Amino acid sequence: MTAILTIVHIFGVVTMGFSGLMLTCFLTASIAKDGAQHAFWLATAITFLVGLLMYLPTLRMKKKVSRKAGFLLVAVSWSLISVFCTLPILFYFPQLSFIDAYFEVVSGLTTTGATIFSGLDDLPMSINLWRHELAWVGGMGIIVFAVAILPILGIGGMQLYKAEAPGTIKESELPPRIAQTAKALWQTYALITVVCLISLRLAGMSWFDALCHAFSTMSLGGFSTHDKNIGFFDSVPIEIVLIVFQLLAAMNFASHYLTLKKRSLKPYLKDMEARALLLLILVSCALVTLVLWQAGTYPDFLTTLRYSTFNLVSIATDSGFASENFDSWPIFVPMWMLFLSCIAVSSGSTGGGIRMIRTIILMKQARLELFKFIHPAAIKSVRIGDHVIPNDIVTSVMGFIFLYFISIVVLIFALLISGLDFISAFSAIIACFNNAGPGLNLVGPTSNYSVLTDFQTMVCIFAMLLGRVQIFSIVILFVPEFWKK
Amino acid sequence: MKILILGAGVTGSSVAEALASEENDIVVIDLKEELLLSLKERFDIATVTGNAAHPSVLEQAGIHHTDIVIAVTDSDETNMLACLIIKALYSRPKTIARVRAIDYLTHPHLFSPQGIPVDFVISPEQIVMESIRNLIDFPGVLHISNFVGGLVRLFSVKVVENGFLTGKKIIALKERFTDGYIRVAAIFRQGLPIVVDGQVVIQTDDEVFFVAPHKEVRQVLKELNKLEPPLKRIIIAGGGHVGKRLALALENDHHVKIIEKDPLRARKIANDLKKTIVLLGDCADETLLLDEGIEGTDLFCAITNNDGVNIISASLAKNLGARKTICLINHVAYSKLLPNTGIDVVVLPNQETLGSILKHVRRGDVQQVSSLCGGTAEAIEAIAHRGNGVNSVVGRQVNAINLPEGVVLGALIRNKQVMPIHHDTVFEENDHVVMFAIDKKLVASIEKTFQPI
């Protein structure tokens, strides 16, 4: 019981925090007089009061969170806080169904960037800001989640986090305490967001658009203030700025932190994931551009290069901006982009999916198995740079990837059974699970997720949450042992 | 001289053996009484049982009158600490310590008067590793050692039937080679040294020792048709200290496999070595050797701690088709078994270690000593000083100094330049002289000749 109350207490703090976030949107609404003042005022008040009601009575319950309670806390925070976050949207659009509003909020908080809204350009400023703020806070949450929460839960612990980024994360280089590490990474995240904001403004966006897009770029969310997404701006400088910052956001923030702290580019060179990411993106861009050029999709080579590069980087880094309808491209290209979204981003970044480090470990393990066919007596470990990856980490990586594929297959079947066509179902699940955003066909870049039925929307919500908390922390709630005393 | 040896292990006892026969007073300290008892039975030495780093034990062993302390216990830390304590409390003796861990060795300034005051640090595994490495770099030689910081090398080859050397007189060789630079230092026939003079005829199966400037070694071997194709594919049996270091040194430009039978040790070296293939198994396991392509292997190095395993696995490997085998042997007596096994080269680690210790014990200004041929012969590098002794060699011609029969001048190095040696060459101050003594007993007279005072 005390465990539950402790969770309630912590959750109360988080809820009150989010009411503060709503307050910023209320202020924006008041200044812009966009008609959403009432909705935000009500939502802020309710959220704050509920938070206070959870916080005050449980003041004495400041116990240390046990591992089990921690898992529960993760699942509860991501799914329940989203309920509060739907309030402003529901108050403003009384006719909108809860499921759709919930989808929008989860999509923001998990930095997926899929939307059910059409007519984004006409949304009140404050509602748009709210969507992008959610994505930004969500991105921040993921970094903290990876550094502070996962270790407490003992999913490989801090070792996993360190093992996930060997060469970069050395104990001596990051602050020794988890809270300090989290703070250092937050500050790095905030700093790069400011740089992104200024760059976007200089590239030609309005201040408001620049702010919103900086939020959704650094969190690799992919929300936009326009229905036509980045295609609305039709500007090469903006696309270049976005490519650069999406790639930065797809790297480990510890590398950014170390680079800023040491004032040298060495941490990037030592960051195996960043190297692999850049190489993979570079090769893929060349490949995709050639395919599109061969197919004659665009009249000249430079246009082909521009659109293929932007959309590929955007999907591969799980951000999900779109400047063109890539759904109409030869099927190889969008499929390859979705494939990259599963593997490309680094650990400790705001992206989702398997993460590059797990991909590398798995590939090395596969090579090791083949090696052992030739030399049955050989003793060899998976090695990344100079680091030897312990066997239990390799096993947990394989466990993760197995769960990853099983989850995806099950969720795709869930969509298929509801009557969705295969391409839509497949791409929707991949895009939601990796927190990328747009899929293909019905849920493609020119369409959105509002066409889905309530059941299908719920499946997609579940996919986003599952992908965001790295599967384990939610799936464990379905294991009977978890609930046994 | 009074010498205190800490540790009665393999190294400690062979040092004791070598020094006891040279009119030294030896005291050996060890924790294990039974080791000391067996040493005492064999040699004329004194022993003390106890912890070698305890001052009371050191005092009991007569540390106050000791000239040299040789710390060769199994533990690096005990060796270093003992030297520290001896310097702090007794200050007089010269200290020599064995240190194995690469972690310590990579910080040479650690062993300074301000740090841990060890006068001479020796690292036998490193020495053994380097000598095996030399054998791999110069395939075809039986022994090779460096002098004067690597400027001069002493190496030996076996004379094959109808080879270039067979039936030649030494005087004829001298005409063949660059006059004066390359010298025949000694010839061993059936394991026994024969006195070298110009008229000796070289026979099949002789082991001929040459001294040559390091740049010429390859050329000499080529002219002797002794330079075999390079050894590329190497299997190392035994992943101990030497095996691991050897693999580390070779793995970048050779294909190295290493066989280790202890799973924990195998895992550890697998983590430390990047390119080497670490195999878990018995190095005398025929199936394993065949699976790993022993018949295509250029070199099989048997360097476990166990002489028996080394001999058996090396001869098995030779039998199964390894082109060449090197075998490490701790007990000199076993080396007599080897001619019938097909094993090509024998490395005697004790000799290598002994050499590195002995050079610090020698009385004259001796820079380096190499024990050869099971310890019967020695190669010595000494520095000529003017001094005031009548025996001083400085200012005298080569044929005027009375080196005893059985001592051969190998090389003369002046200002880091190798000089040709002729009958009328005159020694100067600070000349480095490399000599070869076919009998260890002759060493004392060399020391006398080169004593500084």
Image (cartoon, coloured by chain):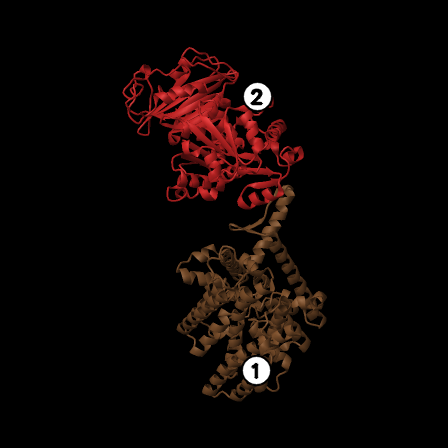
The chain letter corresponding to brown is A
Q: Position of residue B341 (x, y in %)?
A: 60, 23
Cβ atoms under marks 2 and 1 closer than 8 Å: no
Residue A273 appearing in the image? yes
Can you identify the residue that label 1 sits on? A52
Q: Chain of mark 2?
A: B
The answer to whether residue B252 shows anywhere in this view is: no
Percent coordinates x, y for residue B436 in the rendering: 41, 21
Visual hue assigned to chain B: red
Marks 2/1: CA–CA distance: 90 Å
Image quarter for residue A92? Answer: bottom right
Q: Quadrant of residue A88?
A: bottom right
Label annotation for residue B36:
none
From the viewer's perspective, is residue A241 above or below residue A129? Answer: above
Quadrant holding the C terminus of chain A:
bottom right
How packed mark 2 is, by other alpha carbons closer than 10 Å (few <14, some 14-19, many 20 or more), is few
Q: Mark 2 falls on what kind of element?
A: helix
Say above or below: A461 vs B354: below
Q: What amino acid is labelled 1 in the image? A: Leu
| Amino acid at pointer 2 | Lys
Q: Is residue A40 left or right of residue B88?
A: right
